[in-house]
Image (cartoon, grey):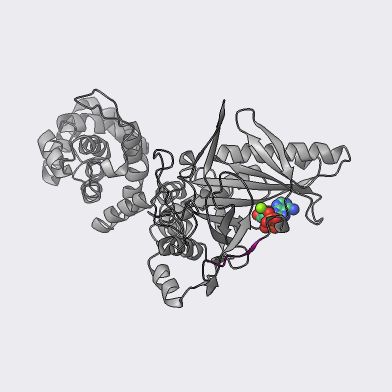
């Protein structure tokens, strides 16, 4: 990249805003959710009407703690809220409730797999430090149309966890890898859905350049990025812009910037505001909250394994190849499905993993269903629509391992299971697929084929030391058994009889 060529090191810190998974808003009982009619998810507290008082939503606080524990952070014994004062029509009270001095989550790390993984080689794993995360309220949404501006307060008061990283990221690609890892941790812990298309995760990117080893350079902050590709593009834009500025001998101005996704360009919003511009002060309406160690431990016990911990377990304890393990751990439901199959047949986790990570996911992705009434074609199926049960998949692998059917037949049975949801044994019987593993019967067939003068030449070659010549006999044997002979047994019997 040009920045490396010119000797600048890129430094990035992200502020990630995540809407937490709760029914009610963070300081009010009004519900929230995507797609409702404007201004239907409000109440007097959300609107900041006189005489109302905020009350902390316990669920929002517990989700924040859950996040903290999922990244190994400290949960201080006390957290409190401050008023961040500014006038803007999306902000009904003229202040936003946030946590400036006593955030709910302090420290913690997110494990990130850096780009560079190839087929069976894990990419480098690095740890990105989180400075803190604080629980605040989201603000309303303005839309500007010809003739005036409209405001929708449905989003006002939605619980928002702001996760602030240390400046540990070194490229746009690393920032993308970090966001994906962060989203996996958050969604798998059940803290939030992080659906960026619904605005549930928004990101501010702080970017600066420096000479390697030098102190941090002056940064810009690009606000409100609402897609991963947007984060990447905005960072790349800033790196290019700052490189040009510095190369031309100009200083970087610390500023807050916006991003125009359509144009692929950043623009100046305002000079960087400082904390004192907001006249922060402790909110007098919300008493500080004491977080008991019992609460913390209860939440900790309930947390699932982190994605990369599970990946290591799959590789170390179950012997899975890197690729299959990575595919499985990306989705908690898929991991649970896989593990249910493994506990039904613990002898071959690799065989099960390959079927799940390759065949099952491919079939699900390729499946659409047509509604018989409307003729509408649905999107691809998801795991919960899958007709195959984990135990049935385990039974299929067992049947193959025990020689009941060949690997080739297993593919056919799998396809049928996917379509019908029938048990593998039922399909094998119905299709007459059961592999012949009766050694007396097979031996009789092999003897008959060996007698056939047509294969005499191959037998002579085999006996003369050409091990591959034996394969020429397998076709006629398969033919005589209608393709049902157990290939491993045929091989064994042939070697025994040919000496
Ligand atoms: P503020 O609250 O004023 O925006 P913070 O010091 O809390 O500033 O930093 C906010 C974010 O900016 C953090 O993610 C931090 O890692 C990042 N950051 C701070 N300094 C730099 C820098 N020089 N270059 C890149 N990122 C930075
Ligand atoms: Mg900031």
Indicate the position of residue 94 as horizontal and vertical percent values.
59, 52
Magenta highlight on residue 91: no
- The quarter holding residue 260 reads top right
Q: Give the range drawn in magenta.
A: 280-285
The one nearer the camera, 393 or 389, is 389
**Place of residue 169 in the rendered image (x, y in percent of width and height, measured from the top left):** 66, 51
Position of residue 350 measured from the top left corner of the image (x, y, whole percent)? 35, 51
Q: Which residue is drawn at 69% across and 41% down?
A: 257
Q: Is residue 356 left or right of residue 223?
A: left
Q: Quadrant of the C terminus?
A: top left
Q: Can residue 308 be seen in this view?
A: yes
**Residue 130 visible (yes or no):** no
Q: Residue at x 46, y 57 (%)?
A: 26
Q: Residue lying farthest front? A: 50
Seen from this angle, which residue lies furthest bottom?
Answer: 293
Q: In this view, does 44 lie above or below 229?
A: below
Image position of 218 (left or right of 424): right
Comparing 205 with 317, the one in front is 205
Horizontal side, residue 161 vs residue 471: left or right: right
> Picture coordinates of residue 384 (x, y %)?
28, 44
> How many numbered discs sit on the rendered protein?
0
Which quarter of the picture shows residue 448? top left
């Amino acid at each position: 990249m040009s920045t490396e060529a010119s000797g600048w090191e890129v430094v990035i810190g992200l502020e990630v805003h995540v809407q937490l998974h709760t029914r009610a808003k963070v300081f009010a009982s009004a519900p929230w959710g995507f797609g409702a009619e404007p201004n239907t998810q409000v109440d007097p507290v959300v609107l900041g009407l006189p005489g109302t008082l905020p009350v902390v939503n316990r669920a929002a606080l517990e989700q924040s703690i859950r996040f903290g524990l999922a990244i190994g952070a400290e949960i201080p014994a006390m957290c409190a809220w401050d008023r961040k004062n500014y006038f803007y029509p999306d902000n009904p009270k003229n202040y936003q409730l946030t946590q400036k001095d006593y955030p709910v989550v302090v420290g913690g790390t997110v494990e990130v797999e850096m780009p560079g993984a190839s087929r069976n080689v894990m990419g480098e794993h690095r740890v990105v430090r989180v400075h803190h995360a604080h629980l605040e309220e989201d603000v309303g949404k303005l839309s500007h149309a010809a003739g005036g501006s409209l405001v929708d307060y449905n989003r006002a008061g939605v619980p928002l966890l702001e996760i602030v990283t240390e400046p540990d990221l070194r490229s746009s690609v690393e920032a993308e890898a970090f966001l994906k890892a962060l989203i996996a941790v958050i969604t798998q812990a059940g803290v939030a859905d992080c659906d960026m298309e619904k605005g549930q995760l928004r990101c501010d990117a702080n970017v600066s350049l420096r000479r390697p080893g030098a102190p941090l350079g002056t940064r810009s902050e690009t606000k409100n990025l609402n897609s991963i590709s947007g984060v990447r593009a905005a960072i790349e834009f800033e790196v290019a812009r700052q490189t040009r500025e510095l190369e031309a001998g100009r200083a970087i101005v610390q500023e807050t910037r916006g991003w125009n996704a359509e144009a692929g360009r950043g623009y100046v919003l305002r000079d960087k505001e400082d904390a004192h511009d907001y006249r922060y002060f402790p909110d007098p309406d919300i008493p500080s909250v004491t977080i008991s160690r019992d609460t913390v431990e209860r939440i900790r016990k309930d947390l699932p394994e982190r994605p990369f911990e599970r990946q290591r377990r799959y590789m170390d304890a179950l012997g899975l190849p890197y690729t299959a393990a990575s595919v499985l751990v990306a989705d908690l439901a898929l991991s649970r499905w896989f593990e249910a199959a493994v506990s039904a047949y613990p002898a071959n986790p690799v065989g099960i993993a390959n079927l799940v990570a390759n065949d099952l996911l491919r079939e699900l992705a390729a499946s659409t269903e047509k509604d018989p009434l409307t003729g509408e074609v649905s999107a691809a199926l998801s795991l919960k629509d899958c007709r195959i049960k984990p135990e049935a998949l385990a039974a299929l692998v067992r049947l193959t391992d025990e020689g009941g059917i060949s690997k080739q037949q297993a593919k056919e049975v799998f396809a049928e299971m996917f379509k019908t949801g029938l048990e593998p044994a039922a399909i094998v019987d119905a299709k007459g697929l059961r592999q012949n593993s009766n050694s007396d019967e097979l031996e009789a067939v092999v003897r008959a084929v060996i007698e056939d003068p047509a294969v005499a030449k191959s037998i002579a070659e085999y006996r003369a030391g050409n091990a591959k010549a034996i394969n020429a006999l397998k076709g006629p044997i398969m033919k005589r058994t209608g393709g049902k002979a157990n290939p491993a047994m045929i091989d064994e019997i042939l070697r025994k009889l040919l000496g």
